[in-house]
Image (tube, rainbow, N blue to C red):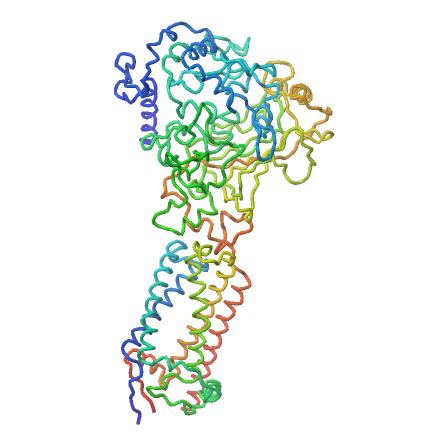
Amino acid sequence: MSERIYVFKRFERFWHWSQAGLIMFLMLTAFDIHGTYTIFGFEKAVAYHTIAAWSLIGLWVFAIFWHFTTGEWKQYIPTTEKVVAMANYYLFGIFRNAPHPFKLTQLRKHNPLQRLAYLAILVCVGPLIWVTGVLYLFYDKWAAWGFGNLSLEWVANGHIAGAFMMLAFLIAHVYLTTAGHTPMAHIKAMITGWEEVD
Amino acid sequence: MSHLFNRAALALCCAGWLAATGPALAEETKPEAKPVKLTTTADHTKFKQLQKTFNSGPEVTKACLECHTEAAGQIHRTKHWKWEYLNPDTKQTLGKKTVVNNFCISIASNYASCTSCHVGYGWKDASFDFKSEENVDCLACHDTTGNYKKPPGFAGNPVVKDTEFPPGSGKIIKGIDLAKIAQRVGKTSRDTCGACHFNGGGGDGVKHGDMDTSLAAPTKEVDVHMDAEGLDFTCGTCHSASSHDVAGSRYTPTAKDDKGARIRGKADKGNPATCVACHDNAPHKKEARLNQHATKIACQTCHIPTYARGGVATKMTWDWSTAGKRDAEGKHIVKKDAKGRIIYESRKGDFTLAENVKPEYAWFNGRVDYTLVTDKIEKSEQRTPINRMGGSATDGKSMIWPMKVFRGSQPYDPVNKTLVTPHTAGNDDTGYWKNLDWDKAITVGMKDSGHPYSGKMEFLKTEMSWPITHMVAPKEKALGCVECHSKQSRLAGIQGIYIPVRDNNRLLDTIGWAVVFLTILGVLAHGALRIVSARRQL
């Protein structure tokens, strides 16, 4: 018989879904700006991308505050425990209906691979995008800020590289939501906050 | 249709306005009867000196100088008078007297025709007296009637009596009444400046592309500043003159003006004809990002989306090498296109013309080096630049400028390796436009300009750049981002700068999309395996 535990609190769910929406919109406008396709066109896409970026920054301010005041930041401390087991599960076990090697609790709501993946996003891809993005926005201030020698080309390419990594993450992340005990289980949990565990 | 009608009506109004020397628009039908609201404190119709018959231009000037005692001396110091200019940056002696271009080529030996646009009377050959005060032409710039004309062939003199020209042709040039014109002098106008500058290169709009007769009474679309129903700037509003010396120069243009707006009381000898002189260096209030653009991009680049927008075509190419053909009867040939514009003349060769032309773009720092008739040129596949526009992404002085690049082929001396100055205009045996004989024309022309001619001639492919600065469009018509930020960028040829989208890194895109594609492939394979294995276990 399965039990239900409350893993995702209200703010966290709000944060997750608004962030998901913003990131997808940022992706949509990003590749419009990049010239991959034309939906809004460069000029409007830049304006929308900028607004969405500032919105996401605002959201992050709240999210960071929330993580520190609630201690939830500890959820992202990496661990080597069961990493191999998790990798084995996704590579082999999942096809044989093997038991999930990770037992989810309120204090450990991310499995070890999730922790590593989210941490990588938080400390590598995220900062890459944010630093290059903010520099891009304030291109005219570089000289005043003492970054006169910075190359716009490198900043731009860094931003674009970050976007590709984020897109790849988004695809994998969305796919892995289906890897719960039912395909919709994780998504339901992210909406209601309640996860069913065995 | 109504647009055309409006402009015609406007032109009539303007004529009336000019005749009245004031904003007495209602009185255009009988401008002499009503008291005139003057913009100056002098009504020249009341001056005894002007109430007489003038038989020549210099007679008028003598009358002018009785009161305006220093005017001629001021004119004597200007490019408009000397047609000579020493470029302080390149040390080249320039000016119309010296330079060669790839339109009508050179004024040497063609004075009587070319000097119809000189602010003087009687410059028919190299012996012209540049110290003469009475030979200064006041009316060329100060006419307000629109009746003042200096036909080519009269060495800058107006025609005061009906005259057959060329002699024996049966064509009569009507004489004009100089007294009426002299009594109605006033400030310079688009018409007076335009009489020459709209017609540079030998006809309406030929040379510049951003200046033609559509600017006499332009709509807002054509020129937001000179808009005859709006701001109604004259040329002098920007090209403000001091002691008759008009600001602005094509020999030493101000490519980058970082001195900010000109404010009264501010000690400043900068060029008042730049955009920045009024608009300052950060004129974009809503979108600060554009001010950043304005540190590298000349205002004109975005705000003049195309030139020759007023319905007058400008010449884009001129191939002198095809000149000289005659029809079966041995007569000169003239060919016109569907719009009635001349595209071939035996006298001149082949032309192409265009309207609404997208400029070419180049880094430009204001330095212009001319190829003069004294310079040695090695003929090559590359076009020889008549003027080399200085500039680069890294010199700190350059901006990206729009240019009209005029391309052609013109006579060249392959032995002396120089450009040549042919005698073209003139009702004589050696003028090319009459007899189509290059050898005679070049021999006489080179003798006049004082340079050696080997007797051999070929044609040299040349190009000449004209920075575009007039015909500023309303702001809604300024270039959108994608005009440059795209793979078909207008700035495709601009080196040394990273332009987002234009300069997307192909390798990065390839790797990026490969990663994304592999991720998709990975999750699809993984998902498929899960489905298959789940079925097997059922």
The N terminus of chain A, quarter of image: bottom left
Residue found at the very far top of the displayed protein? B52
Residue B371, percent across and down?
Answer: 63, 33
Taking depth in this image into account, of B123 and B261 the one nearest to the observer is B261
Residue B13, percent across and down?
Answer: 31, 23
- Asked whether residue B484 is in view, the answer is yes
Residue B60, percent across and down?
Answer: 44, 10
Residue at 57% across, 31% down: B87
Quarter holding residue B283: top left
Residue at 59% across, 33% down: B408
Residue A188, percent across and down?
Answer: 31, 80
Residue found at the very far bottom of the displayed protein? A1
Taking depth in this image into account, of B11 and B188 the one nearest to the observer is B188
Taking depth in this image into account, of B502 and B517 the one nearest to the observer is B502
Residue B302 vertical position relative to residue B19 in the rendered view, above or below: below
Classify residue B238 as left or right of residue B509: left
